[in-house]
Image (cartoon, rainbow, N blue to C red):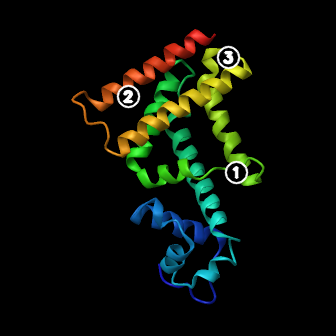
């Protein structure tokens, strides 16, 4: 994307969209003020008219990536019945997303969303709401729900991170191992009730 004509100045959303394009084209390390500015045909200080810092660029980009993930997740899984299998389906959706968009997933996992930020807080609430819906079939207390969400996220993130680094080199199918892990998580959740 070249420099916009004077009559069409850049918006904050244009900068974030450019950041996502950079991530898609070059990987998670491309999420930086200089690289995004270069892709827009502007000097890096011009970015600061829209976002106050490099950290703000990372935060806003991660928020947008999470929003897109949640829209896709809702489109794929939103109409499914709430059963114990919904959690397993969510695990597969997340892994498929990470395979299709490895750099986006890496940014989503590396940039911590700040709950006190209104935009990030809204995304966090939407994400937690979706997970709560997936877990509602388990009839968990609030404390158990928090434990399960942490356990589920840690297991899936860890598996995907190891897989993306190419460290799953043993002869067994990675897909089969992932299924076994999800089944074990579901059984573990069943024992928490």
Q: Is residue 6 left or right of residue 77?
A: right
Q: For mark 2, does the 10 Å Cα neighbourhood hold few (<14), some (14 to 19), or many (20 or more) residues?
A: some
Q: Which one is earlier in the sequence, the residue at label 1 or at label 2?
A: 1
Quote the CA–CA distance across marks 1 and 2. Answer: 30 Å
Q: Position of residue 143 (x, y in %)?
A: 72, 22
Q: Which mark is residue 139?
A: none
Which residue appears at 49% of the width and 20% of the height? 185
Q: Is residue 35 above or below residue 103?
A: below
Left or right for 137, reference 18? right
Tag 2 residue: 178
For the point 48% across and 77% down, the residue is 39
Q: Quadrant of residue 81?
A: top right
Residue 92, quarter of picture:
top left
Badge 1 vs badge 2, beta-carbon distance below 8 Å: no
Decide if residue 107 is in sight here: yes
Q: Identify the secondary structure beneath mark 1.
A: helix
Q: How far is the residue under mark 2 from the one under mark 3?
A: 24 Å
Res 79 seen here: no
What is the CA distance from the residue labelled 3 to the residue labelled 1?
Answer: 26 Å
Of 67 and 164, which appears nearest the observer? 164
User: Where in the figure is residue 76, as x and y percent of width and height?
Assistant: 49, 38
Which residue, given by chain and number where applicable, does mark 1 sit on?
Answer: 120
Could you tell me which quadrant the C terminus lies in? top right
Residue 23 or 89: which is nearer the viewer?
A: 23
Secondary structure under the numbered disc 2 in the rendered image? helix
| Picture residue at 71% right of the left edge, 50% below the top | 114
As drawn, the label of residue 140 is 3
């Amino acid at each position: 994307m070249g420099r916009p004509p004077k009559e069409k100045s850049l918006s904050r959303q244009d900068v974030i969209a450019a950041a996502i394009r950079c991530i898609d084209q070059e990987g998670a390390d491309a999420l930086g003020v200089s690289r995004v500015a270069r892709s827009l045909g502007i000097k890096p200080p011009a970015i600061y008219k829209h976002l106050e810092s490099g950290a703000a660029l990372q935060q806003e980009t991660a928020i947008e990536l999470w929003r897109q993930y949640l829209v896709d997740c809702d489109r794929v899984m939103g109409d499914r019945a709430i059963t114990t299998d919904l959690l397993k389906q969510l695990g597969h959706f997340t892994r498929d997303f990470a395979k299709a968009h490895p750099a986006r997933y890496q940014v989503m996992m590396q940039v911590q969303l700040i709950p006190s930020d209104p935009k990030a807080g809204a995304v966090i609430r939407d994400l937690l709401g979706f997970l709560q819906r997936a877990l509602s079939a388990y009839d968990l207390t609030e404390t158990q729900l928090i434990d399960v969400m942490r356990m589920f996220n840690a297991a899936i993130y860890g598996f995907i991170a190891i897989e993306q680094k190419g460290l799953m080199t043993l002869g067994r199918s990675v897909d089969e191992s992932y299924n076994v892990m999800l089944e074990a998580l579901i059984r573990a959740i069943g024992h928490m009730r």
